[in-house]
């Protein structure tokens, strides 16, 4: 059943929140992310092949662990947004938003009348009928979060129009795709890319829309905190796990070498 969106309320209150992108479609891993203490997870459908049943179980796992689950969509697809929200996601992340019209379409697909045109269904989102539909519509319009990703030069150029759309709750940058759009593919720290990210963040502050930073260097977390940013996406679970595996093995190798030399 639809729950209070702790992430959305934390953002409104200026509380610091930390999230992780989920690239391994496994409910157990999502549950671990929640119990590890993260505030939100973004379940990726843009680059990951997760079937609908698995996605729904990943959302259930997040609910069990008190974790706010957002779903990154394959694109601006109203039908895909509908299915993710009907599965119980507490919000959606739309990649490659480049215009006000695309931002408006994302909001419309995620909200019920009078704020949008989302298709009507019941099921697990209403507790299989424990919430009557009018009550559910009102709560869903208030609780569900709509986030957009700015990953293209056009999105940066139109950022003021995008973030001024009513119903946009959060904005994320996509530095790697931005680097390609600016002709320096793979160079997330290139001055042109960093300038674009700063322009996105400045527009968010101007329009009072939360910006989610993605620190890629140790000093960048503090940089964004000084700029009043409270939301941080700390990479993806695949990368975190791989680095942990490597460090774990290296520690054991070092310890074994030390034991042999005693």
Image (cartoon, grey):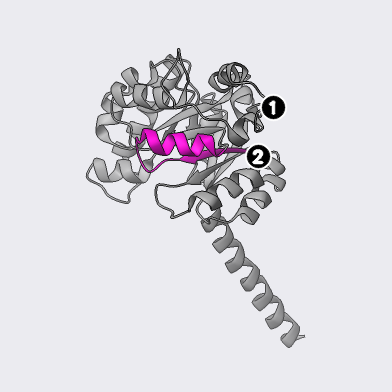
- The quarter of the image holding the C terminus is bottom right
* Vertical side of 24 occupied by 175: above or below: above
Q: Residue furthest top?
A: 114
* Vertical side of 148 occupied by 203: above or below: above
Which is more toward the observer, 218 or 8? 8
Residue 138 visible here: yes
Label 2's element? loop
Q: Does residue 200 appear to the left or right of 136 in the view shown?
A: left
Which residue is depicted at the point 58% across and 37% down?
88
Instruction: List x then y, in percent, for residue 188.
Output: 36, 45
The circle on residue 67 is: 2
Which is more toward the observer, 74 or 183? 74
| Residue tagged 1 | 130
Identify the mark nearer the N-term, 1 or 2: 2
Q: Which residues are magenta?
A: 68-87
The circle on residue 18 is: none
Instruction: List x then y, in percent, for residue 131.
Output: 66, 24
Which residue is depicted at the point 58% across and 68% down?
246
- For the residues carrying marks 1 and 2, which lies nearer the camera in this image? 1
CA gap between label 1 and label 2 equals 22 Å
Q: Is residue 83 magenta?
A: yes
Q: Is residue 150 magenta?
A: no
């Amino acid at each position: 059943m639809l729950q209070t969106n702790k992430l959305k309320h934390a953002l409104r209150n200026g509380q610091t929140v930390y999230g992780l992108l989920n690239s391994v479609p496994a409910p157990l891993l999502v549950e671990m992310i929640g119990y590890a203490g993260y505030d939100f997870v973004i379940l990726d459908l843009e680059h990951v092949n997760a079937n609908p049943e698995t996605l729904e179980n990943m959302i259930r796992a997040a609910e069990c662990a008190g974790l706010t689950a957002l779903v990154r969509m394959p694109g601006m697809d109203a039908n895909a947004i509908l299915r993710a929200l009907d599965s119980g996601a507490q919000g959606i992340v739309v990649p490659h938003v480049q215009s006000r019209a695309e931002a408006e379409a994302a909001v419309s697909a995620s909200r019920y009348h009078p704020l949008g045109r989302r298709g009507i269904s019941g099921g697990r989102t209403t507790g299989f009928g424990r919430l009557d539909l009018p009550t559910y519509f009102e709560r869903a319009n208030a609780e569900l979060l709509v986030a957009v990703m700015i990953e293209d030069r056009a999105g940066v150029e139109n950022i003021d129009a995008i973030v001024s759309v009513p119903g946009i709750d959060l904005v994320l940058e996509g530095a790697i795709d931005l680097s390609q759009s600016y002709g320096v593919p793979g160079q997330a720290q290139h001055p042109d890319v960093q300038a674009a990210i700063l322009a996105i963040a400045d527009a968010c502050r101007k329009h009072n829309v939360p910006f989610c930073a993605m620190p890629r260097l140790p000093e960048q977390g503090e940089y964004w905190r000084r700029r009043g940013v409270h939301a941080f996406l700390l990479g993806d679970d695949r990368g975190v796990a791989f680095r942990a595996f490597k460090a774990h093995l290296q520690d054991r190798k070092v310890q074994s070498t030390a034991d042999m030399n005693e």
